[in-house]
Image (cartoon, coloured by chain):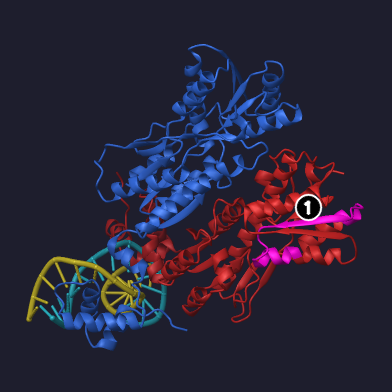
Chain colours: A blue, B red, C cyan, D yellow
Amino acid sequence: MKSKITLKELAKLLNVSVSTVSKALHDSPEISPKTAERVKELAKLHNYRPNPVAVNLKKSKTGTIGVVIPNISNNFFARVLSGMEAQAQKHGQQIITYISNESLEREKQICDMLTSGFVDGVLIAVSEETQKKNDYEHLYALLEYEIPLVIYDRINIGLPTDKIGVDDEKSFYDATKFFKAKGLNKLGLASAIHHVGIGQLRIKGFEKAMESGGEAYKATSTKPAELKRKIRELVTSDRVEALLCTDFESAIMAARVAYEENVDIPRDLKLIGYIGKDVAEFLTPSLSYIEQHPQEIGSNAVEVLNKRLNGESQPGKFEEKIIATTMVHLESTRF
Amino acid sequence: MKSKITLKELAKLLNVSVSTVSKALHDSPEISPKTAERVKELAKLHNYRPNPVAVNLKKSKTGTIGVVIPNISNNFFARVLSGMEAQAQKHGQQIITYISNESLEREKQICDMLTSGFVDGVLIAVSEETQKKNDYEHLYALLEYEIPLVIYDRINIGLPTDKIGVDDEKSFYDATKFFKAKGLNKLGLASAIHHVGIGQLRIKGFEKAMESGGEAYKATSTKPAELKRKIRELVTSDRVEALLCTDFESAIMAARVAYEENVDIPRDLKLIGYIGKDVAEFLTPSLSYIEQHPQEIGSNAVEVLNKRLNGESQPGKFEEKIIATTMVHLESTRF
DNA sequence: CTGAAAGCGCTTACAG
DNA sequence: CTGAAAGCGCTTACAG
């Protein structure tokens, strides 16, 4: 049962002062090579590790990053977190995870505790409710406490912070153009997130691409039953040739409507959605999707935060980094 | 730009000592009501929060729990984490997340840093590689440092720690009995995890239930192509009437084989798998599954750990808590 | 080259 | 009822 050994104990064993031990372990040039070696040897023998809490107190930092995630069940966010963890690891930082469950109330609580100094910086994807209610006071509070903030994924928010996300508009612009280039004329869009920022951007990309011609149809609703009805109409009455879905819910619903209506994908209907690789690959047929590279978003978020923490970013000047999306074609867009 | 105010500053403003302020804020009976009120008022005005790092140093604890997750993309673990976070919240504890990516090497690194005192206790689901190589030294190291450990989910490991998981054997025993009660005779089992503990337990449950009669078939392999071939054989040649899948991979593969072979689920083949609700519901047809209640596993893991941390558990005596599974019937087991 | 001292921000036993 | 002092485990400017 080895309990952790402290600097003080080490010093006593070596008959030197605590300062000498500390300096020796930090390769200070003040210390004689002979002493340094003695110290290091004993430290190694006892497997000495500085107490991180004490080091942090001394350095007035915590060595941790707070990550606020709206919904961890969403594979996208799970993979973002994975990217963050891997990157933080490289810097010897710890990730403290907070889950807001898309709730403004919970997000406020989290930000409140964050202001008391648990973390050096915060990475946040703002909850849906927060966006809807347009209430960002708690985030401004964080900024007032001089806790660096990086907003990831849901970045079309007017906060003076660094941001990192994907080009939502372009992704759907490109996808729409792709179908048109293949000769399709009647294109549909389905969305359960038309009321939030990223949804609007994706829809905008679709609309812009349709300006040059073709028939555009849209099915949008936050209510599952209503959305399903509208999608069914697009598929059975309007007979769109392809459907672009802005989110997981609408994509899965489109697949289900096709299944129920015996519409053959991809023969009668092409389908592409903003859904995760994890599910997309396993559907029958497999569903083409827009890859957002969540791990990269995660690792980049940590990088941007660390730049800020290390004073490598210009104060008052904020970075907005965009990770390019990729279309991944599986069975549902086979021509 | 309010920077955090300290006890010392508060004391100066009030013309009292630091100790008085501290005691007043902790409702110490030593302090006069009048002073207490003055202190609290000013503290509130300045929104004073004790620096958690300092408090932790003083108390020789960290207020954080380390969680080691093998694979965060697995929705099961994502939801376990969610349950842990919610429960930790209630105790004012922070969750530090580490992702081992099913790698023994990574797991060792994580445990190594954990021994230096970042956390008060650790919740871990052991990686697949660790189980295969049967190498638990790094976990014993944690125990030697007297860092309480709770093993969750993958619990059939001979370590002297508290454990929390589900009754894997019973879950598949029950599922098999269910099919037999419905009059099915030819039952198949598919597994990509027959080499790890939980896989073996599930298979054992199946086998036990089949002892009382019926034809049992098995398709097991860690190689996707081989597993697929074997499942196809079960479905097309052996014509099993129901297939029980021990894991995500085999379940998805079974669904795909049926799709490719035009075997109608559930008419010609019933299917049940150990897969997450998140995917199960969205497949076409939707896939019946065994609900493991991941959030409960998570919250219980935190509870068990805290009991240990608070000295409410008997030293040397370990708890093994089992959360009951539930069969959730969706389209794939419709009779 | 080594060590005593101050200090990070707190808590608490002890003295007054 | 209040405050000075010690201490949690470390780091670092300063003195010797």
Badge 1, how many Cα within 10 Å: few under 14, some, many 20+?
Answer: many
Q: Which residue is mark 1?
A: B234
Residue at image coords 75%, 43%? B258
- Is B196 included in the stretch rendered in magenta? yes
The percent coordinates of residue B235 (x first, y second) are 79, 49
The percent coordinates of residue B152 (x first, y second) are 61, 65
Please, what secondary structure does the residue beneath circle 1 have?
A: helix
**Magenta part of the protein: which range?**
B179-203
Which of the 4 image quadrants contains residue B21? bottom left
Of residue A316 and residue A290, the one placed in the foreground of this image is A290
Of residue A243 and residue A162, the one placed in the foreground of this image is A243
Of residue B22 and residue A86, the one placed in the foreground of this image is A86
Q: Given the image, on which type of amino acid does mark 1 rest?
A: Leu
How many numbered circles are shown? Answer: 1
Residue at image coords 50%, 63%? B103
Q: Residue furthest top?
A: A213
- B17 above or below A20? above
The percent coordinates of residue A188 (x first, y second) are 60, 20
- Is B298 included in the stretch rendered in magenta? no
Residue at image coords 45%, 35%? A325
The percent coordinates of residue B18 (x first, y second) are 32, 65
